[in-house]
Image (cartoon, rainbow, N blue to C red):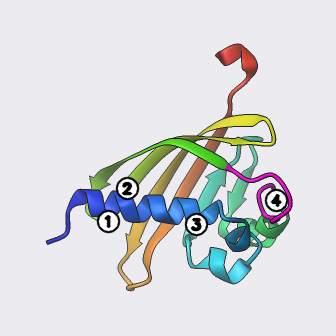
Amino acid sequence: MKHESDDVNEAVAGELRLMDPNVRASRSLARELLDPEFVEVGASGRRWTYEQMLAALPDMAGGFEEGPHYQPSDITGVVLAPGLVHLTYETMIDGRRARRSSLWRKRSDGTGWRMYYHQGTLVSPEAE
């Protein structure tokens, strides 16, 4: 029997994989983790679609072994409905802090958990 915490753990594992420089640098690996209907509202305010993200991800922050990497903290998750998990957490990269929120859904086609929606919000020093 599968427990809700198993679903949250699978979503967290996917989230952490998407922060891995090797995954970010590989469109084929990233494609395995992003839902075909993926949308992101980035910390910059830009809206990203699935195809736009796959095209840009290898050149974005955190995509290089020798560069800065995402440092996640305080990851928590909750099952909103069967096959739908909401994660919240914070990241630091290159001195920039952001609060993040992701929705992960389990695909009915057997391809597993995929990130369906992501939003990042920069935290200004004044917000402390």
Say which residue label 2 marks: 85
Say which residue label 1 marks: 83
124 up-or-down from 49: above or below? above
Badge 1 marks a residue whose secondary structure is loop
Residue 47: x and y, percent? 71, 51
Which of the two discs, 3 and 1, labels the residue nearer the N terminus?
3
* Extent of the magenta region: 60-70
59 up-or-down from 91: above or below? below
Local crowd size for mark 4, using a 10 Å CA cut-off: few (<14), some (14–19), many (≥20): few
Badge 3 marks a residue whose secondary structure is helix
Which of the two discs, 4 and 1, labels the residue nearer the N terminus?
4
What residue is at 70 percent from the left and 47 percent from the top? 42
Q: Nearer the viewer, residue 95 or 28?
A: 95
Query: Is the Cβ of the residue at disc 3 closer than 8 Å to that at disc 1?
Result: no
Say which residue label 4 marks: 60
Residue 103: x and y, percent? 46, 55
Q: CA distance from mark 3 to mark 4?
A: 15 Å
52 up-or-down from 76: above or below? below
Residue 118 sits inside the magenta stretch: no
What residue type is disc 4 on? Met
Local crowd size for mark 1, using a 10 Å CA cut-off: few (<14), some (14–19), many (≥20): some
Say which residue label 3 marks: 17
Asked where in the image residue 65 lies, by quadrant, the reply is: bottom right
Badge 4 marks a residue whose secondary structure is loop
What residue type is disc 3 on? Arg
